[in-house]
Image (spheres, helix red, strand yellow):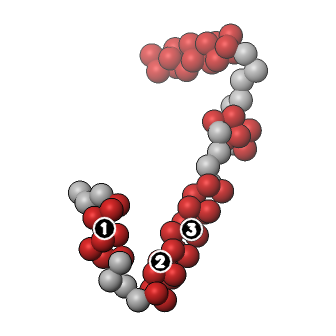
Amino acid sequence: MQNAETIYQQTILPLPKSEKLQLAAMILQNLTNSEKNTQSAYDLLQNLTDEKVFSSAKEVDENLQAERESWDN
């Protein structure tokens, strides 16, 4: 896989200024969108509507145990 410097030298540098600006805008747009979609695990859990959210480790353990027992039945 080529590194960024090689890609720049071989592919980007020869482009006309307008193409370089278009490419830069595309890269910035992609970075901006990916940052907006980044959430912490806590945020993901808070936004779940159909999933269980537990308030303690004990609740998690109890739920896991009940789930495991249901597999055996």
Tag 3: amino acid: Leu
Residue located at (49% from left, 89% from top): 18
Mark before the other along the chain sequence, 2 or 1:
1
Tag 3 residue = 28
Tag 1 residue = 7
Mark before the other along the chain sequence, 1 or 3:
1
Rendering coords of residue 54 (x, y %): 72, 23
Q: Is residue 33 visible?
A: yes
Rendering coords of residue 72 (x, y %): 45, 16
Tag 2: amino acid: Leu
Secondary element at image label 1: helix
**Looking at the figure, which quarter contains the N terminus?**
bottom left
Query: For the residue carrying disc 3, how many other residues have a C-alpha within 10 Å: few (<14), some (14-19), or many (20+)?
Result: few
Mark before the other along the chain sequence, 2 or 3:
2
Q: Check residue 23 in the rendering and tell me which mark sits there, or answer none.
A: 2
Residue 49 higher or lower than 4, as above or below? above
Q: Which of the 4 quarters of the picture holds residue 41?
A: top right
Tag 1: amino acid: Ile
